[in-house]
Image (tube, rainbow, N blue to C red):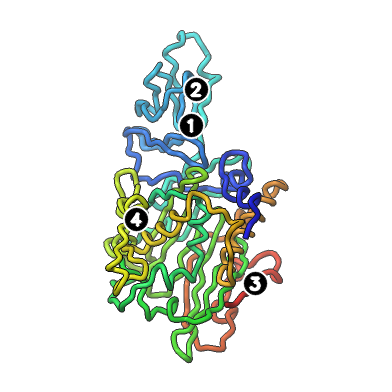
C-alpha cells in the first residue's frame, strides 16, 4: 500500500505538483492528427489540468495555444482559423502557432502593443497519427518521440483514443497487471481468432498460457527506459511461456505478446486528476493490420467526442446471461473490460486501503519508478528514460516459448543497449 501522502503525490498532475512536473519533462500525446483540419474549427484540449486549444492553420501547420485570449479572456476555441493562426472573435486579436500576436486591430496603427503580447503556446510534433506536445522548460526539451510504430504506414497502424473517467495511474497499473487477464479477459469457451489477434470481443481462450499457467513467475527487469514486466508460465510439461512488456515513463506501455500476435502500445495522458485520454496503437511490422479485427476485439464504441457508448452509466452493457457460458466478466470487448475495471474503482483509488499480494510486483515497480522520477526532478536531474542515447525506436514486446530449465535471462535476454546504469539492480524477482 501507499501512504495517503505518496498516493496524492503520484496522482496529482497540475502545474507545480510533483507528478505534474514529471509529466512536463516528456513529449506526450495532445490529440489525434485527424482531429484538426487545415483552416478548420479549433479543438478544445485539456492536458495536465491546463485548458488549451489545438488547430491546423490554412497552410497545414499545427499549433497548441492557451485557450483564453490574453485581452479579455474569450475562448479561442471560438476563434477564426485564418491567415497564419487563430483570431479572437471578440476584438480581432490574432495569434500564430507560436503564440506571437500578429494583429491587434483594436489598437492604433502606430501602436507597438502587440509586440508585448505573447499567448501561451507549446511546441508540437506530428508522428504516427498523433500530435505530440512538450509542456516543460524549453531549455530541457528532449528529442521528439521516435517509437517503432511512429514511422509505419497507415496500413500497418491503427491509432485510437478514448476518454476514461479515472486517474491515469490506475489505468497504467491495470495495464501491467498480468494476472487479471485470467479473469477479467477470460472467455469461457475456445474461439477461432483472426490473424494477429490475442482475443475476440469475448476475451482470451481458456487454453491460453496466461490462463492455464499456475503459479507463474512474475518479475520486473530494470532498464534505462523504465522496466520490462515479465511473466513466465508453461504451455505444457516440457515448455515455458515467457512474456515481456516494456513499461516507459511517463505513462506508456507495450502490451505483452507472442510473435504471431499484433503489437499494441498504450499511452495514458492525464486530462486532469480524475480523467484521462487513453491512446491505443495497434500495429504490425511486416504486413498490413486488420483494422476491423482489432476494432471489434477492443469493444470501445465511441461518439464524436471519443466517449464510450458502453460506459459506467449503462454498466458497460454487462450481460449476466453471457457470464454463464461465454464470458467471465459478461462484458464484450477486451478494452471495454479494462475500462469497467478501472473506472469503477472511483476517480482516484485510495491506495492506503489496498491489500497487495505477490502478483502485484509490477504495480509496485511502477510506483517506485514514478516516485524515483519525482525525486530526480526535485533534485534538478532528468527523470527516468530521457537519456537521448536510448534507442527508443528499438523497443517493442516479444514473447517466446522455450524448453523448461533455460534461465529467464538466457531465454529472453535484455538487449545491452537497454541495460541500466547499475547491472546489479537489473533483476528483481518475486514468485507467487
Residue at 49%, 84% in the rendered image? 240
Q: Residue 5 at what x, y percent from top left?
A: 65, 49
Q: Are marks 1 and 2 in contact (CB under 8 Å)?
A: yes
Name the residue: 35% across, 47% down: 307
- Dots 2, 4 in contact, CB < 8 A: no
Between marks 1 and 4 in the image, the one whose residue lies nearer the viewer? 4
Circle 2 residues within 10 Å: few <14, some 14–19, many ≥20: some
Q: Residues within 10 Å of mark 1 (few under 14, many from 20)?
A: many
Numbered badge on residue 428: 3
Q: Residue at x 65, y 65 (%)?
A: 420
* Earlier residue among tags 3 and 1: 1
In the visual, does 232 lie left or right of 57? right
Residue 197 visible within the image:
no
Camera-near label (3 vs 1) is 3
Image coordinates of residue 123 in percent, x first then y, are 50, 39
- What x and y, as percent, mark residue 157? 36, 59
Residue corresponding to mark 2: 70
Q: Is residue 293 left or right of residue 240?
A: left
- Whole-angstrom CA distance, mark 3 to mark 4, is 38 Å
Q: Earlier in the sequence, mark 2 or mark 4?
A: 2
Amino acid at each position: 500500500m501507499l501512504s495517503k501522502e505518496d498516493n496524492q503525490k503520484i496522482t496529482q498532475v497540475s502545474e507545480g505538483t510533483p507528478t505534474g512536473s514529471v509529466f512536463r519533462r516528456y513529449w506526450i500525446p495532445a490529440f489525434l492528427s485527424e482531429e484538426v483540419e487545415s483552416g478548420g474549427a479549433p479543438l478544445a484540449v485539456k492536458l495536465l489540468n491546463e485548458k488549451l486549444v489545438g488547430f491546423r492553420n490554412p497552410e497545414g501547420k499545427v499549433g497548441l495555444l492557451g485557450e483564453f485570449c490574453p485581452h479579455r479572456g474569450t475562448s479561442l476555441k471560438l476563434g477564426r482559423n485564418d491567415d497564419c493562426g487563430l483570431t479572437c472573435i471578440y476584438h480581432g486579436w490574432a495569434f500564430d502557432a507560436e503564440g506571437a500576436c500578429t494583429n491587434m486591430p483594436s489598437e492604433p496603427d502606430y501602436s507597438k502593443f502587440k509586440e508585448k503580447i505573447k499567448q501561451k503556446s507549446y511546441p508540437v510534433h506530428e508522428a504516427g497519427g498523433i500530435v505530440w506536445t512538450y509542456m516543460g522548460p524549453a531549455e530541457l526539451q528532449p528529442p521528439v518521440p521516435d517509437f517503432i510504430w511512429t514511422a509505419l504506414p497507415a496500413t500497418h497502424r491503427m491509432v485510437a483514443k478514448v476518454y476514461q473517467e479515472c486517474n491515469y495511474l490506475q489505468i497504467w497499473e491495470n495495464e501491467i497487471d498480468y494476472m487479471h487477464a485470467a479473469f477479467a479477459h477470460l472467455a469461457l469457451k475456445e474461439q477461432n481468432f483472426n490473424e494477429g489477434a490475442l482475443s475476440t470481443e469475448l476475451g482470451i481462450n481458456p487454453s491460453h498460457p496466461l490462463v492455464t499457467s499456475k503459479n507463474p513467475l512474475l518479475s520486473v527487469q530494470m532498464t534505462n527506459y523504465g522496466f520490462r514486466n515479465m511473466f513466465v508460465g508453461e504451455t505444457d510439461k516440457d515448455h515455458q511461456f515467457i512474456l515481456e512488456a516494456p513499461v516507459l515513463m511517463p505513462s506508456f506501455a507495450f502490451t505483452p505478446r507472442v510473435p504471431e500476435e499484433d503489437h499494441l502500445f498504450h499511452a495514458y495522458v492525464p486530462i486532469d486528476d480524475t480523467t484521462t485520454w487513453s491512446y491505443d496503437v495497434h500495429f504490425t511490422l511486416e504486413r498490413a493490420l486488420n483494422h476491423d479485427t482489432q476494432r471489434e476485439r477492443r469493444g470501445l464504441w465511441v461518439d464524436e467526442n471519443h466517449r464510450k457508448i458502453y460506459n459506467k452509466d449503462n454498466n458497460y452493457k454487462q450481460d449476466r446471461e453471457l457470464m454463464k457460458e461465454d464470458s467471465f466478466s459478461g462484458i464484450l470487448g477486451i478494452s471495454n473490460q479494462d475500462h469497467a475495471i478501472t473506472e469503477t474503482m472511483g476517480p482516484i483509488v485510495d491506495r492506503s486501503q489496498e491489500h497487495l499480494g505477490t502478483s502485484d510486483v509490477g504495480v509496485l515497480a511502477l510506483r517506485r519508478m514514478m516516485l524515483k522520477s519525482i525525486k530526480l526532478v526535485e533534485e534538478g536531474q532528468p527523470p527516468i528514460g530521457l537519456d537521448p542515447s536510448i534507442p527508443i525506436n528499438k523497443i517493442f514486446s516479444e514473447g517466446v516459448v522455450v524448453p523448461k530449465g533455460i534461465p529467464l535471462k538466457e531465454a529472453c535476454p535484455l538487449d545491452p543497449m537497454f541495460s541500466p546504469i547499475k547491472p546489479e539492480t537489473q533483476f528483481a524477482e518475486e514468485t507467487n
